[in-house]
Each structure stands twice: as C-alpha cells, then as structure tokens.
Amino acid sequence: MPRVAFTHHLQRHVSCPAAEIAGRTVAEVLEAFFAANQRLRGYVLDDQGCVRKHVTIFVDGRPILDRARLSDPVAETAEIYVMQALSGG
C-alpha cells in the first residue's frame, strides 16, 4: 500500500501521522486519508480541491504534475510526502 506522510510543520497544526493508505492516484490516497481527518483537507487543498499554492506533494521524490485533479499515479510501494513551502523576506 502507498505510504503518505506530512511535514512536521503541518503536524504542528493538525494531527496527521504517516499512514499506509490504499489508492491508485494521489487523489484516491488523499481522499481516503481526509475521510478520517477532514481538518487536514483545508491545509492541503483549496475550496476547489486543488493543491494550495504553498503546498507541494511529492511521489517517490518527484513533485506531482497534476495539482488540480491529483491524477498522478501511485504504485503499490509509493511514498507520498506532503509539505508546505516556506517563504520569507
């Protein structure tokens, strides 16, 4: 099963321990995770269901290509990592 993990920055705001979640696309894995953790959805996705501007999702070390529909495929052994980009000035 694919494994999804969230940066410690997100974990400071909402409980989101790493988990193994079934799914064939990023969308399927995240939807299954959000089913048990609706609060996290708002940190990761906007009101249209797209990845927020300052959030990045990697699958096996590569950034996803489809930030709108999250249709990037995930293998059975995939590692999905969700993180917020930090900026400063």
Image (cartoon, grey):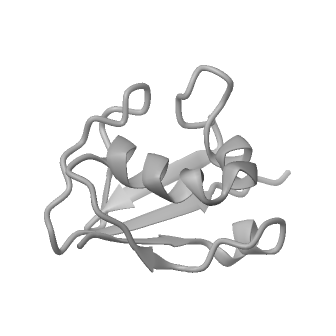
Would residue 28 appear left or right of 19 to someone viewing this image?
Answer: left
**Residue 9 falls in which quadrant of the image?**
bottom right
Q: Quadrant of the N terminus?
A: bottom left
Residue, x 66% and y 58% (percent of image)?
37
Would residue 85 appear left or right of 71 to someone viewing this image?
Answer: right
Would residue 75 appear left or right of 10 to someone viewing this image?
Answer: left
What x and y, as percent, mark residue 29? 37, 54
What x and y, as percent, mark residue 20? 37, 76
What x and y, as percent, mark residue 36? 61, 59
Would residue 21 appear left or right of 56 to someone viewing this image?
Answer: left
What x and y, as percent, mark residue 19? 45, 77
Residue, x 33% and y 32% (percent of image)?
66
Q: Nearer the viewer, residue 68 or 36?
A: 36
Q: Nearer the viewer, residue 46 or 57?
A: 46
Residue, x 55% and y 28% (percent of image)?
49
Residue, x 51% and y 51% (percent of image)?
56
Against 76, is 39 above or below?
above
Q: Residue lying furthest front in this view?
A: 36
Against 34, is 17 above or below?
below
